[in-house]
Image: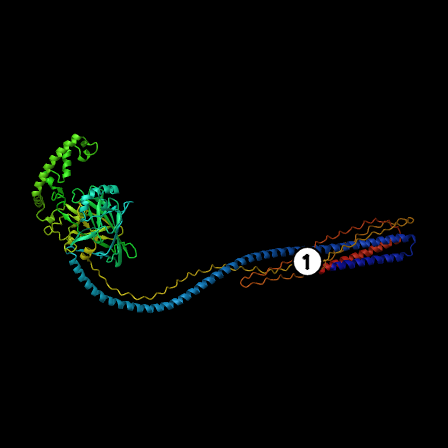
Amino acid sequence: MNKNSVKFGLASACLTSAILFGVHTVEASDQSSNIQQNESDSYGKALTTYKAETIKYELDKKAYEAELKAYNESVAKYEADKAEYDKAKAEYDKALATNKETLTKYESDLSEYNKQKAEADKVKAEYEKLKAEWDAKKATYNTKLVEYNKQVKSNEAADKIENDKRRAEYNEKLKKFEEESKKPGRFASKEKNYLIFVKEPNAKISIEVKDTGDTGALAMLKYTQKDGSFWKLNHKKLSSDQLSDEALAKNNLTDKIIKRWDETVTGYREYGKDPHITTYPVIAKKDRPFTVTYTNLENTTYDKKKVTRIDYEYTVLETGSSVDTMQISPAYDPTISVSIYGDFRKHGYSTRVRMKPTLYLEDGTKVIPTKEKPVMFAVSSMNTGWHGYSDNSYYFADNKDMFKEFYGKSGVYDEYLNDEFKKLYNVDLETASKPGGLLSDPSKRQEWNTKKAELKTAYVKDEEEYKKDGFKKVKDYMTNKYGSNVNTWPSTYREIVYAIHNASFIKLNESFVYKHDDGFYADKTLDEINSGNPVWDNQESPYKYKGAGVIKVTEDGFYLEFGATVPFTQLFGINTAIVDEYIDVKPKLELVETPKPTPPTKPVEPKQPELKEPTPLGVAPKEPNKFDKEKPVKPDLKEPKAPTPPVKPDLKEPTPPTRPVEPPKVEKPVKPVEPPKVEKPVKPVEPPKVEKPTEPVEPPKMVKPTKQVETPKEEIPKEETPTKLVEPPKEEKPTLPRTGSASDMSMTVVGLLTTLASFFVFTKRKDESNK
């Protein structure tokens, strides 16, 4: 309770005491009054008490209102302080949450930074380790490198001495090579021949013979004569359509034809000085290939590797006769190769055969020549004559029909008859002889037979005359045209290599064989050298190069096509004998170079890593300023208790006495001075300071702060509104007895009240002046 309340209490007590004192005094003084006056006095006394209590109540009410105001102000201030506190606390909590998020990101960035830095530190440490190792190895390497360079220089000095010697030897060899390569028969080559294929007398032969399918020779020929004779007499009966058993029997050739391979069926021919070499004659059909296989080779090598097998695939392109078959006679030795036969010396027919050789090493691998390791074959015995080598000797020379040149008649009798028949009937003889043709008319046939006899008589007469001096006439013709040196006369009979596939031709010095648009052959006469005795056409002759050439093969798929302008006993072979004899390989300067010692291995310098600096961290978040605002304490105030209003006494109206004489009207007493204002209530005790919230411990390097304990929200009890003071019932002013004693007592009470009011005002002002 504050001082004002005390003062008001004291004043109220004093006033009450004074009133009671006055009442008691009046009562004492009126004890001697009339008994009738007692009831009136009791009523007045009660009324006076009631009024005194009413005044006290008003005073207490004012004190209560003052205290209530102070109480409400204190509560309002508390609520304002608490609102300010709550706002500051909310802002602090928000800043703390923001700081927490920032701290979390910072800690994540810090973790990544530390990870990157650890990785960078690790890479750097590894590099420094490798660098240290490299430095050591580099020092060792430098020492060994000095030794290595010293050894290399020593070797180079020794090599120079040796190579100077080799250069001198090379120059001598080169000089000799240039001299030798210009001699007759020789040829220069940058590469040596990697094939040795000279003689294979012990080779085993087998031939593909069958009369079915698309390949193979049709049959073997069995006879006792020299090769060529049997075929000349019987080839027109041995075309492919006459090899049936019935046809052979009809032509009495059954025992001459073997339709399978039989190594005991042989023929023979001359070769060089040997008058009898073994052959294996077969019937080959035009455009039907067959294979001849030689095994058990003993002397053949390629690149110093043993060759044990060679296959020749033959395909007849021109038979040299009017039938579709040809006799081909492979020799027992693959280096001699083969002989071919058509209609022997029949003018107007040529021969042409494709030969495809394939060699195999001992392990079965096919030999495939290369530019670095070529194969060189010699083609030799390529005869040529200035006349045609036909039955009618010397009828054909200078590549023309000389009989016709001198007598106007074809040197071939059948051609002569055909020419005369055309003159008579304006149609060729072959057409007229067909069924339904001109000669189907008996009269025409008789007419022609008579005329043919006359023509033959005249032709024989001219032929006999030509034979007497025809040779001289032709030779005089050639001499007059080309001079006396027969070897300069153009060849009419020619043995030719028509084509070379996947290979090249090399001409030998002073050889007659050249490359021409239509093949490789000698366009001058070879067979008249040494007075008509071709001593060059022999493997032992020093002049064999005159009818030879070299074929150089540098890739797979090689074949050639050979034959003659007139069917003859042509022997065609490929081997390396002439190559080996006549080749001059250009010497190569092979300088020595001592292999360098193994150089020291240069250590690989470790690559300096690109040290990636960790992503820089942002500024670490600062913790918000500590929240040091004290929480306002709710004032521990008790709501002032409102004074209880005085209860109006339940008094019975006293029996009025006999109305006395009305006293003179008493003037209305002066309104008492308002009591001094209730003193300002004592200032409530300042609420105790709210304890400072526990300050979060700062983590090392931004460790997440301990979660702040939330200050419990203290519910401020809702202040009850003070009970409104009940206004005391308005007193009905009683009618007082008009007695002198009552007047005196009223005046006495009024005087006391005035004195007390003045005292109260004085005290109030004194207190205000003291403040």
Residue under label 1, please give it.
634
**Image quadrant where one finds the N terminus:** bottom right
Q: Residue at x 17, y 30 (%)?
A: 442
Near-viewer residue (605 or 54) = 605
- x and y, in percent, of residue 634 in the image: 68, 58
Q: Is residue 89 visible?
A: yes
- x and y, in percent, of residue 389 in the image: 14, 45
Residue type at mark 1? Lys
Near-viewer residue (546 or 395) = 395
743 left or right, relative to 368: right
Q: Residue at x 47, y 59 (%)?
A: 616
Neighbours of disc 1 within 10 Å: few (<14), some (14-19), many (20+): many
SS at mark 1? loop
Q: What is the quadrant of residue 84 in the picture?
A: bottom right
- x and y, in percent, of residue 652 in the image: 88, 50
Near-viewer residue (374 or 291) = 291
Q: Is residue 515 visible?
A: no
688 left or right, relative to 266: right
Q: What is the quadrant of residue 31 in the picture?
A: bottom right
